[in-house]
Amino acid sequence: MSDQDDLPKLLDDCVHCGFCLPTCPTYVLWGEEMDSPRGRIHLMQQHADGEPLSGPMVEHFDRCLGCMACVTSCPSGVQYDRLIEMTRADVEREHPRSLKERAIREMVFRLFPYKRRLRALRGPLRAYQKSGLDRLVRLSGVLERISPSLAAMERLAPPLGKAPRLPERVAARGERRATVGMLTGCVQGEFFPGVNAATARVLAMEGCDVVIPKGQGCCGALSLHSGREEEARAFARRTVETFESVDVIVVNSAGCGSAMKEYRTLLADDPEWSARAEALSARTRDLAEYLVELGPRAERRPLPVTIAYHDACHLAHAQGVRSQPRELLAAIPGLTVREIADPDICCGSAGTYNLFQPEAAGELGDRKAVNVDATGAELLVAANPGCSMQIATALRRRGAAIAVAHTAQVLDASLRGLGRDALTARGS
């Protein structure tokens, strides 16, 4: 059965009760009914009944972060995640965007899902940052005048150091307990290579042989969550092929893990790939999810640091992984975990959202930074590269001296006995 056959029931599941309203970031910002899940479902019904996609309708759909907080809060089980993805696919097929919008979108989707292109960008971007030109460009506001999306892209780029390259296999320390495949990701791999290195070390120290296929590409998350269905399916097929020989695929990026668990739906109508996609989705695990399933073996050494843990939307809402990261962090001696107020309100990253909707994303980032700063933590821990960049940028804007790290880096520092300075000096 196709998505379009499912659409009437998916729309009818919504009883317009309003439980989603206080969990929706854009409704929280503006209080506009059509910028809530309930309002957007009303617009989706209008389109299903034959009304063409108008500019204002598309604007309300574009303003949605796809954070899935409404899915978690809905008492009726409305599958808003499927609805917004189907609607975005309709938008991409039917709605003519302006030349400027098309140019920005094409630039983003021709760059970020391609590792070689990102890698080619690293050198010039690193030189640009080291020269201090980045500060002058931001002060001048020149990029903001050309394009707010370009300005957001430049502002969000994390400080770049040397990028260590991982081997294709990292051997287990001591007796082998499992063999796992590891997704390195696009943005994670090129902008946060230290996270991947830490992930591989932690898995190895916990007794896993880690297989890191050299030819792996993009998982398709950015394309899938932006309505570019065929592009997402092509990336998905390649990822299925790449990891078909391993029993478990461990993913350290929330958006990527969520997309790979959705392959079963994305390729459901493809007779050649549906069973293979279903099998891969069933074998995909977030890093924290997998480590809790595996159970600890390596010794945790003291790490006297106070952290604030951030729930990435595609980890907490889309995958339901909330307790596992906290369980892993709480098991580290000396470490204190503090909760952030309004944890279910998105930070504004949301894949490409902070590039295409920079003003709304900035407001949400500033709200999150205020709540992170209020914890008094020395370190923010997040499990998604987009969240790390978004919140780190907002913290810098606020002047808050809080470093940002991934759960894998905190575990790695404890297992290797590196101490707090290895994390708090690292920054984002």
Image: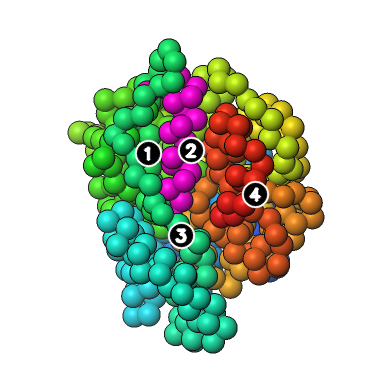
**Residue drawn at 41 percent across, 58 percent down:** 226
Which comes sooner in the sequence, label 2 or label 1?
1
Circle 4 residue: 424
Residue furthest top in the image: 175
Q: Amino acid at mark 2?
A: Ala
Q: Determine the CA span between mark 4 and mark 1.
A: 26 Å
**Residue drawn at 40 percent across, 69 percent down:** 127
**Residue drawn at 65 percent across, 58 percent down:** 25
Q: Nearer the viewer, mark 2 or mark 1?
A: 2
Visible in this render: residue 405? yes
Q: Amino acid at mark 3?
A: Leu
Residue 287 position, x and y percent, is 50, 33
Which comes sooner in the sequence, label 3 or label 1?
3
Which comes sooner in the sequence, label 4 or label 1?
1
Which comes sooner in the sequence, label 4 or label 3?
3
Circle 3 residue: 160
Badge 4 crowding class, 10 Å Cα cut-off, few under 14, some 14 to 19, many 20 or more, is: many
**Would residue 308 be counted in the magenta stretch?**
no
Mark 3 near mark 2, Cβ–Cβ under 8 Å?
no
Say which mark, if any, is on residue 183.
Answer: 1
Visible in this render: residue 87? no
Circle 2 residue: 198
Q: Amino acid at mark 1?
A: Leu
Numbered disc 2: secondary structure:
helix
Q: Amino acid at mark 4?
A: Thr
**Nearer to us in this view, 389 or 409:** 409
Magenta stretch in the rendered image: 191-209
Give the quarter of the figure containing the C terminus.
Answer: bottom right
**Would residue 201 be counted in the magenta stretch?**
yes
